Image (tube, rainbow, N blue to C red):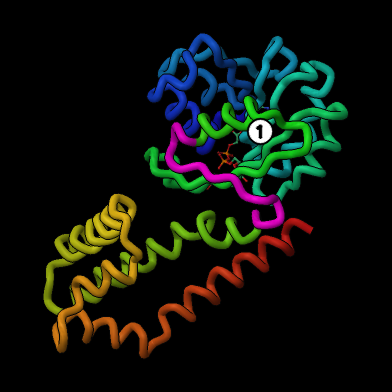
Amino acid sequence: MGGGNMGTALLKGILETATARADQIVVAEKAEEKAEKLAKELGVRTVNRPEHIGEVDLVLFAVKPQDLDKAAASLKKRLEKKALFISIAAGVTIERLTGLLPAHTAVVRAMPNTPALVGMGATALAAGPDVTDGQKKLAQGIFEAVGLAVWVKEKNMDAVTGLSGSGPAYVFMFIEALSDAGVFQGLPRETSLMLAAQTVAGAAKLLQMSDKHPAELKDMVTSPGGTTINGVHALESRGLRGALMDAVARATQRSKELGS
Ligand SMILES: NC(=O)c1ccc[n+]([C@@H]2O[C@H](COP(=O)([O-])OP(=O)(O)OC[C@H]3O[C@@H](n4cnc5c(N)ncnc54)[C@H](OP(=O)(O)O)[C@@H]3O)[C@@H](O)[C@H]2O)c1
């Protein structure tokens, strides 16, 4: 339900990785234009009223948190007891979701991030009490279609929001600042931005593909008295780690405030 930014990103990932076929998916999207585009581009059946969905064994809620109550109410009578219900609504707890649905509905709460739009998302998942192991596998497969998916305790979802949910913004700022720094040293703007973005993407990939701790990889490029250790000293003098810890702490706190 909800064929917006996140819904469409997940749908594309699911189809591209053959996690499901187009003829197994129905999208409920109330905006007519968006629905037509999805049907045409992805070959899925679309309906503008959830009542027309038919019988399903998995519901993925990708509507805004403020639309959730209404959307759940429209589905409540139709929901098969065995159906798995997955919500990506930021800040909406499993307890609240369960209250909107028939008793003992299996509920998974997910927190994806925007790199899911390019298949490089980082999603944290938390399972409600009635979710079976098979349903957990199903939920994980959906989010692995657009990147990485990990299970966490629900109480850690605010920290996830502060880290990977808000994290793309911190990284965009880091890349912008790094490219400004290159321009400051005389590099053309476009060259500087390309080098900065690729450096971040490449370093992340190198870390993920090696079995080394990030500190070890850093040590490998910091020769005694060399250029990199001079740069590291400047970052440490300005408290890079403390700034990041404060950023995640503030975002986590805000997520708690918005959810309560
Ligand atoms: N974007 C992110 O980075 C991100 C990250 C983590 C979690 N999330 C969560 O993902 C969810 C979706 O975000 P989004 O950015 O994809 O929002 P979006 O682009 O606004 O998509 C939501 C879509 O659902 C439609 N809709 C609303 N109520 C509906 C209903 N009852 N039946 C069928 N369709 C309905 C909306 O139509 P109208 O436009 O006509 O209202 C809209 O097209 C949110 O709950 C958000 O908290 C997003």
Image quadrant in which you'd find residue 140: top right
Q: Is residue 79 visible?
A: no
Rendered position, 181 above or below 163: below
Q: Residue 123: where, in percent of width, then height? A: 53, 45
Q: Is residue 252 visible?
A: yes
Q: Which residue is mark 1?
A: 86
**Amino acid tagged 1:** Ile
Of residues 76 and 187, which is closer to you in this image? 76
Estimate how packed mark 1 is, as few (under 14), some (14 to 19) or many (20 or more) residues with alpha carbons within 10 Å.
Answer: many
SS for tag 1? strand
Q: Residue at x 42, y 85 (%)?
A: 239
Q: Quadrant of ligand 1?
A: top right
Q: Residue at x 74, y 56 (%)?
A: 259
Q: Is residue 219 magenta?
A: no
Q: Residue 102: where, in percent of width, then height? A: 85, 27
Q: Residue at x 27, y 59 (%)?
A: 203
Of residues 125 and 212, which is closer to you in this image? 212
Left/right placement of residue 58 relative to residue 150 reads: right
Left/right placement of residue 127 relative to residue 226 reads: right
Q: Residue at x 63, y 65 (%)?
A: 252
State which region is magenta: 144-157
Outermost residue, front side: 211
Image quadrant in which you'd find residue 105: top right
Q: Residue 48: where, in percent of width, then height? A: 65, 19
Which quadrant holds the N terminus? top right
